[in-house]
Amino acid sequence: MKISARSCGGFAGLAAAYDLDTAAHPAGNELEDLLHQLDFFSAAPVCPVGADMPRWEITVEDGPRCHTVFVREDGSGGDWQALLDRLRSTA
C-alpha cells in the first residue's frame, strides 16, 4: 500500500507531508493493520469544517483501489489519531 498524508490549516498554518510504501517500510504491517481497523476504503471522505482546525488529507493506494479521506486533528484521540501518530513516528 502507498500512503500519502498532508496536513494543512490550524492557526500557525504549518504544513507536514508523509509518503510511504508499506511494502518497503519496517512498520508497514502495523500501518496496514491500522488502516484495516479504520475500514479505510469504506470511510466517508468528510471534509472538516473550520480553517483554524488542523486537518489531514490521507490517500491510500492499494493496487487498483485508491481512496482519500479528510481528518480533523482535534485532540479527540481514537484510531484516526493513532494512524496520524504512527505516520509521524515512522517518517
Image (spheres, rainbow, N blue to C red):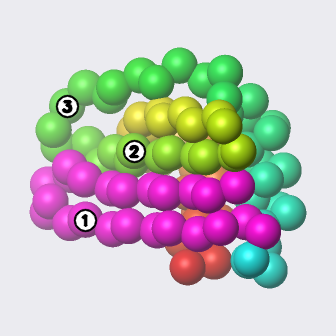
Q: Which residues are magenta?
A: 1-23
Task: Check the picture and name the quadrant holding the C terminus.
Answer: bottom right
Residue 63 appears in view: yes
Whole-percent x, y for residue 20 in the image: 59, 69
Do tag 3 and tag 1 residues touch (Cβ < 8 Å)?
no
Q: CA distance from mark 2 to mark 1?
A: 11 Å
Q: Say which of marks 3 and 1 sits in front.
A: 1
In the figure, 26 relative to 52: above or below? below
Whether residue 72 appears in magenta in the rendering, the answer is no
- The answer to which quarter of the image holds residue 37 is top right
Q: Which residue is mark 2?
A: 57
The answer to whether residue 30 is left or right of residue 35 is right
24 and 37: which one is in front?
A: 24
Whole-percent x, y for residue 42 in the image: 66, 21
Whole-percent x, y for residue 50 in the image: 19, 31
Q: Residue at x 73, y 66 (%)?
A: 22
- The answer to which quarter of the image holds residue 39 is top right
Q: Secondary structure at mark 2?
A: strand
Task: Check the picture and name the quadrant holding the N terminus.
Answer: bottom right
Q: Secondary structure at mark 1?
A: loop
Q: Which residue is mark 3?
A: 50
Pick whichever of labels 2 and 1 is earlier in the sequence.
Answer: 1
Whether residue 7 appears in magenta in the rendering, the answer is yes
Q: Which residue is mark 1?
A: 15
In the figure, 53 relative to 28: above or below? above
Q: Secondary structure at mark 3?
A: loop
